[in-house]
Image (spheres, helix red, strand yellow):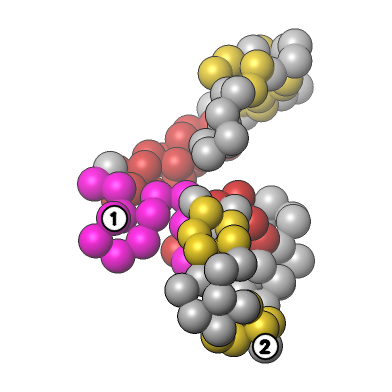
Amino acid sequence: MRRTATCDTELAGQRIAEGEKIVMWYISANRDESVFPDAEKFDVGRANARRHLGFGHGIHRCVGARLAEIQLPTLIEELVERNWRVIPHGAPTRLPRPFLHGFTAMPVQIETRS
């Protein structure tokens, strides 16, 4: 997502000159320390977790977002109730895209805790 400034401007204290290229890195949005304290930490109980941009925002919000938000707690509850744990079982395969980051495969083994 690269854009070219059409006039001199200032954004969040940063001066941008006409003609300069500006790049937006989607992956950085959910790591903004001013929005998410300790942003690099995986925290399923984060108070403002719904501000995460994984499903988009506004009119571009994913239509399946609400379903996923319901499925995840259900999955976690079932894992806990059945006393299961998910163990990584091999290296994950990443999606090789500059725009989207994710996995194409993540081998795991499900074990019952003793």
Q: CA distance from mark 1 to mark 2?
A: 28 Å
What's the residue at 45%, 41% (across, down)?
Answer: 72
> 11 or 109, which lies in front?
11
Q: Quadrant of the C terminus?
A: top right
Is the Cβ of the residue at disc 1 closer than 8 Å to that at disc 2? no
Q: 111 above or below 61?
A: above
Q: Earlier in the sequence, mark 1 or mark 2?
A: 2
Q: 84 above or below 89?
A: below
> 30 or 21, which lies in front?
21
What's the residue at 49%, 80% (across, down)?
Answer: 7
Residue 64, quarter of picture: top left
Q: Which residue is mark 1?
A: 60
What's the residue at 46%, 74% (across, down)?
Answer: 6
Q: Which residues are magenta?
A: 51-63
Question: Residue 1 placed where, x, y %?
Answer: 49, 51
Determine the secondary structure under disc 2.
Answer: loop
> 47 or 99, which lies in front?
99
**Of discs 1 and 2, which sits in the foreground?**
2
Tag 2: amino acid? Gly
Question: Residue 5 placed where, x, y %?
Answer: 51, 71
Residue 76 visible here:
yes
Question: Residue 93 placed where, x, y %?
Answer: 65, 17
How many residues crowd around disc 2 within 10 Å: few (fewer than 14), some, or many (20 or more)?
few
Q: Is residue 79 left or right of residue 33?
A: left
Q: 15 above or below 87?
A: below
Residue 9, quarter of picture: bottom right
Question: Residue 106 placed where, x, y %?
Answer: 62, 18
Q: Which mark is residue 13?
A: 2
> What is the chief secondary structure element of the magenta stretch?
loop
Q: Is residue 49 left or right of residue 56?
A: right
Tag 1: amino acid? His
How many residues crowd around disc 1 within 10 Å: few (fewer than 14), some, or many (20 or more)?
few
